[in-house]
Image (cartoon, grey):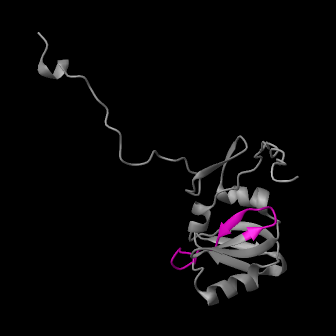
Amino acid sequence: MKTERQRRPTTVKKSARAPSTQTCEHGLPLLKHQDERMCALEYLNRFVAPQRVDKVTRRGTQLYLVFDSGEKLECCCESCGESHGDDQSFIREIKEIALGRRALRFRLEANGHLMVWFARGDHLHLHRNALERFRPPRRGRGVRPEHAPAPPASNQGKQ
């Protein structure tokens, strides 16, 4: 004889949490570049260094270093971990150090923050959030737009 517990179908409840993401030895999420997985730090050192910082741009209150290769690295304050694109003195300091310079190396410090070394020995200290929020740009998109020629103009009103 089957008991009530045996007759009931088992259901698996889905967790409300997001699925666990794989991380590197630094605890950073792994990114996919082509068919290879790597952390943001490795990606920056392999594909961004020694690119030049082409511009410093804002998107809302986020401030980004934009490299020649198109990658964007958010400038997260070392103290609080947030980007202060609305703070003119913060923007000025970032531009003085980074704008027009080549980023030679990206290093994770013992305290977990990111250090960006530039040509001529200058460096920039950023919060770890800059690495955690970094995503490589999407490349290799192909578009084949279709164009339908405009219909010929009618000559009804002209005589």
Image position, residue 105 (x, y; %): 76, 67
Residue drawn at point x = 58 percent, y = 74 percent: 60
Residue drawn at point x = 80 percent, y = 80 percent: 121
Q: How many marks?
A: 0
Please say if 124 is above or below 92.
above
Image position, residue 30 (x, y; %): 61, 50
- Is 108 in front, or is 131? 131
Q: Quadrant of residue 148?
A: top right
Please say if 90 is above or below 117.
below
Task: State left or right for residue 47 relative to residue 109.
Answer: right
Please report the bounds of the magenta region as a residue range. Answer: 66-83
Q: Residue furthest right?
A: 159
* Figure quadrant of the N terminus: top left
Residue drawn at point x = 80 percent, y = 46 percent: 150
Residue 77 among those drawn in magenta: yes
Task: State left or right for residue 127 relative to residue 1.
Answer: right
Q: For the stretch drawn in magenta, what is the main secondary structure?
A: loop
Residue drawn at point x = 61 percent, y = 67 percent: 130
Q: Quadrant of residue 75?
A: bottom right
Image position, residue 110 (x, y; %): 59, 69
Residue 122 among those drawn in magenta: no
Please say if 93 is above or below 50.
below
Image position, residue 63 (x, y; %): 63, 75
Please say if 80 is above or below 43.
below
Q: Residue furthest top?
A: 1
